[in-house]
Amino acid sequence: MDLTTLGSLLLGVGAVVGGLLTYLGKRSENALTGFSSLTTTLQAERNRLDARVAELNAKIADQASLRAADQAEIARLRALIISLGGQP
């Protein structure tokens, strides 16, 4: 095998290895882009759900204050019934 054949063979191997590395690099780039897109989507969904949870917590607090007012009114009415001679 002469030097020209060996050089051509090494050039061919180098081209195949370079193509393989380019292919793997592009796959990694696509995976990273997909991961970034997924992360962005998940963060947006998390923020939307956090807002929904805050809204539901506000509704629960409002319902709790209404319940406390109802309980106070029930206690007042029971006391009024007892003072009028009734049985609650």
Image (cartoon, grey):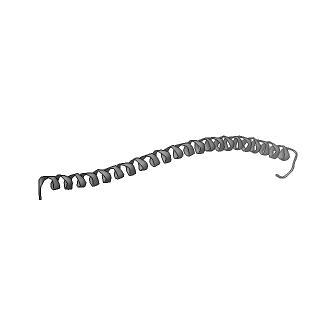
Q: Which residue is farthest left?
A: 2
Residue 47 as seen in the image, left or right of residue 15: right
- Say if 71 sits above or below 17 in the image: above
Count of numbered circles in the view: 0
| Res 71 → quadrant | top right
For residue 15, side relative to residue 82 (left or right): left
**Residue at 61% over, 44% down:** 53
* 24 versus 40 height, above or below: below
Q: Is residue 14 left or right of residue 49?
A: left
Residue located at (82% from left, 44% from top): 77
**Residue 42, x across and y down, in percent:** 52, 46
x and y, in percent, of residue 56 in the image: 65, 44
**In-front residue for pair 8/61:** 8
Going by the picture, which residue comes out furthest to the bottom? 1
Residue 40 in percent (x, y) is at: 51, 43
- Looking at the rendered image, the quarter that the N terminus falls into is bottom left
**Front-most of 84 and 59?**
59
Where, by quadrant of the figure, is residue 52 drawn? Answer: top right
Residue at 84 percent of width and 52 percent of height: 87
Residue 18 image offset from top left, x and y in percent: 29, 50
Seen from the viewer's position, the closer of residues 87 and 49 is 49
Left or right: 78, with 33 as reference point = right
